[in-house]
Image: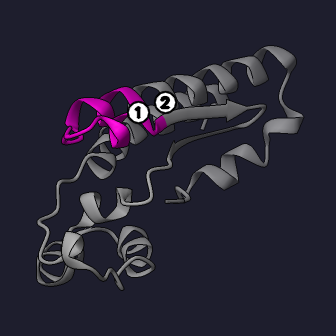
Amino acid sequence: MKLEITGLNALTKKFDNLSKESQKDVNSALEAWADDVASNAKLLVPVDTGRLKGSITPQYGNGYAMVKVSANYAAYVEFGTRKMASQYVPSLPQAWQDLAETYKRATGKEFTGMSPRPYLYPSVNKFTPILLQDLKDIFKI
């Protein structure tokens, strides 16, 4: 799954114009966000075999951060399938609805009528306001 958080691009475009100390602060804020989101998602994700939980990893570098969930069924757990997904997904922000749409064609018995068990959205939703405030403080916005 890949999701871009809007609002960060405008701030990170200013990244190159920051002092080295401020760039370090931005990277620290991004790393903390990715670590927090990944840790919280691991607390929320349902565990059967542990494969999905183990596939949640924070990744970051100079001026970016993300949380990668690499299990091939991750989106179906997050959004549910079929009727269950169609009831849950419209309650999400548009960017998340668009992401869910890319996974909507699940087939096979293992994906029939699975209820959503959100773990990533609540984690991103919980920690993104903190990140945005940290970045606003750094950029003095």
Identified at 68% across, 25% down, the residue is 27
Identified at 27% across, 80% down, the residue is 108
Q: Nearer the viewer, residue 22 or 70?
A: 70
Q: Is residue 52 left or right of residue 43?
A: right
- Expressed as whole percent of the image width and height from the top left, the position of residue 68 reads 53, 45
Residue beneath label 2, please?
33
Figure coloring? one colour
Q: Which mark is residue 54?
A: 1
Judged from the image, the secondary structure of the residue bearing numbered disc 1 is helix
Give the Cα distance between marks 1 and 2: 18 Å
Q: How many marks?
A: 2
- Residue extent of the magenta highlight: 38-56
Q: Is residue 89 left or right of residue 11?
A: left
Q: Is residue 43 above or below residue 3?
A: above
Residue 50 included in the magenta stretch of the image: yes
Q: Earlier in the sequence, mark 1 or mark 2?
A: 2
Q: Nearer the viewer, residue 137 or 124?
A: 124
Q: Amino acid at mark 1?
A: Gly
- Expressed as whole percent of the image width and height from the top left, the position of residue 78 reads 27, 58
